[in-house]
């Protein structure tokens, strides 16, 4: 199943490049993503039954519960994006906003992007992980600039430059981590092996571990969009086509956060606790949430609004990783899942809104509940969910993070986070009130109706999942979260 996951993207890319009909692109893209999801399901069942799955050199393939948790999100969101893109690009083709040649390039880059993330999440070697995350930058930068307009190209260049600089710093961190493991004798290929590093963390050089963590946090933190390293994220998320925005926010940020969790786990185990890593992660966490709170109140572009919301939630994940208690890590991983599914649904919904209204300006979108009778309510509920209201799953994971913060004795941090989250919700409510219930200007008319029927199915299913999972999560999912928490904690 591991080779199906890695081989499917490579197999379908030539088909995309040779396709002569849009329907073939849609069918191959959807079929390929579904095949990967099925293979992932089989792999997840194997991991649940027998533990981590691994192949040694020269493959360095390794998937445990932590890797599979993040990988599963990639596969789920990939299917959602491919199904949504079917209706989305049919509309774009019909309006003359794109052509078959551009669509072939889009699907080829999309699956190169997916392949890079799968590699990052199925390797035991932190060096290969770094290469794969850099690969995601190369593939997704062209997707950000897909519309080939001035602002989208500017966003793509900013994304490429800042993330490349960031990932270069992460490379220094990985290199120093390799140096820290130089005193151990595990044979060729083990110096950056995740299982080996965890098993021998107490033998690693402490000073080098600290230095490695600093560079890795800054490097991977840039890719994860943590403030003040976030400058690329609002532009990239707002200018990319909505299916690409869903991938960037829903899974790319998780892949970078996954790298931070892996390095943090090794460093904490080697140093005997999170006294060194915790303050840095918690500081970046509250800075990120505070930055999002400030900019959310002034946004006039609804995609940039969601982009700053992603910065907020990455900050919450960093805070949980900094607290580094079993409860905090469990809540962090649960929140990663909830944010990924909720934000993907929201970005997909904004694609339909943009096609209907032709603008990303919040002031030019009114009466959404009447104009889009399905997408409008779904988007409204999605904003309630990402704002942290019950009974949606984001509420419960945020509650878990704040509870673990207070239980860990970080009273000031917990109080500050609570205040900022309340401010962010008020910002959402004030900014978006007229979008859903306001009247359209007299000189602007929009015909009611849904332009993307396949996309409706995706949005409704995602909405059901985030609505139910907060209080009725399947036992298999709880087991996966518990196992992943044990792995991060080193138990």
Image (cartoon, rainbow, N blue to C red):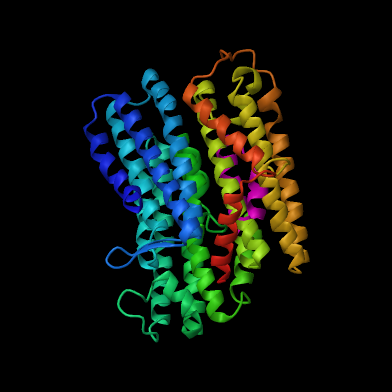
Tell me what residue is drawn at x 49 percent, y 19 percent. 451
| Looking at the image, residue 475 lies above or below residue 389 | below
Q: Position of residue 139 (x, y in %)?
A: 34, 47
Query: Which residue is at a point 68% across and 42% down the rendered structure image?
Result: 387
Find the residue positioned furthest to the left.
18
Residue 327 at what x, y percent from top left? 68, 62
In the displayed structure, does residue 273 sit left or right of residue 419?
left
Residue 173: quadrant of the picture: bottom left
Q: Does 486 lie within the magenta span?
A: no
Instruction: Give the magenta range.
Output: 289-317
Which residue is at 47% across, 51% downward?
Answer: 45
The answer to whether residue 22 of the structure is visible from this angle is yes
Q: Is residue 355 above or below residue 222?
A: above
What count of labels does the image hold?
0
Which quadrant would the C terminus be assigned to in this image? bottom right
Task: Look at the magenta stretch and give its main secondary structure.
Answer: helix
417 and 326: which is toward the camera: 326
Q: Quadrant of residue 323?
A: bottom right
Q: Is residue 219 left or right of residue 2?
A: right
Q: Is residue 301 visible?
A: no
Residue 151 lies in quadrant:
top left
Name the residue at 29% across, 68% down.
57
> Is-magenta flag for residue 316?
yes
Q: Position of residue 468 (x, y in %)?
A: 65, 39
Residue 204 lies, in percent from the top left, at: 46, 83
């Amino acid at each position: 199943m591991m080779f199906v996951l890695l081989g499917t993207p490579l197999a379908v890319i030539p088909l995309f490049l040779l396709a002569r009909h849009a329907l073939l692109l849609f069918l191959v893209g959807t079929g390929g993503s579904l095949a990967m999801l099925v293979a992932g399901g089989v792999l997840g069942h194997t991991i649940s039954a027998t533990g981590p799955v691994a192949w040694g050199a020269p493959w360095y393939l390794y998937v445990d519960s932590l890797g599979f948790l993040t990988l599963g999100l990639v596969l789920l969101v990939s299917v959602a994006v491919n199904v949504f893109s079917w209706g989305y690009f049919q509309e774009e083709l019909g309006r003359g906003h794109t052509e078959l040649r551009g669509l072939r390039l889009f699907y080829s880059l999309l699956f190169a992007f997916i392949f890079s993330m799968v590699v990052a999440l199925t390797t035991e070697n932190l060096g290969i992980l770094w290469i794969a995350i850099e690969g995601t930058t190369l593939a997704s930068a062209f997707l950000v600039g897909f519309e080939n307009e001035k602002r989208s190209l500017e966003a793509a260049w900013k994304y490429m430059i800042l993330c490349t600089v960031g990932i270069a710093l992460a490379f220094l961190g990985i290199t120093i981590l390799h140096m820290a493991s130089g005193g151990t004798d595990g044979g060729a290929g083990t110096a950056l092996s995740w299982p080996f590093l965890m098993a021998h963390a107490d033998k690693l050089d402490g000073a080098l571990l600290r230095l490695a963590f600093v560079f890795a946090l800054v490097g991977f933190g840039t890719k994860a969009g943590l403030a003040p390293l976030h400058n690329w994220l609002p532009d990239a998320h707002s200018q990319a086509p909505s299916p690409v925005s869903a991938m960037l926010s829903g899974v790319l940020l998780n892949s970078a956060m996954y790298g931070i969790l892996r390095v943090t786990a090794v460093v904490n185990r080697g140093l005997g606790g999170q006294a060194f890593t915790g303050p840095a992660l918690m500081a970046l966490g509250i800075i990120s949430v505070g930055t999002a709170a400030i900019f959310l109140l002034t946004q006039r572009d609804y995609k940039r609004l969601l982009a700053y919301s992603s910065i907020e939630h990455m900050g919450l994940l960093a805070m949980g990783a900094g607290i580094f208690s079993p409860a905090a890590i469990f809540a962090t991983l649960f929140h990663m899942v909830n944010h990924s599914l909720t934000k993907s649904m929201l970005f997909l919904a904004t694609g339909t809104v943009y096609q209907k209204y032709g603008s990303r300006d919040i002031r030019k979108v009114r009466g959404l509940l009447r104009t889009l009778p399905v997408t409008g309510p779904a988007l409204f509920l999605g904003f309630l969910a990402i704002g942290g209201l019950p009974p949606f799953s984001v509420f419960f994971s945020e509650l878990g993070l704040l509870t673990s913060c207070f239980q860990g004795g970080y009273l000031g941090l917990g109080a500050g986070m609570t205040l900022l989250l309340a401010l962010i919700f008020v910002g959402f409510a004030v900014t978006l009130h007229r979008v859903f219930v306001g009247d359209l200007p007299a000189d602007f008319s929009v015909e009611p109706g849904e332009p993307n029927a396949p996309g409706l199915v995706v949005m409704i299913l995602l909405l059901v999942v985030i609505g139910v999972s907060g209080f009725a999560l399947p036992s298999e999912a709880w087991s996966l979260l518990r196992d992943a928490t044990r792995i991060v904690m080193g138990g």
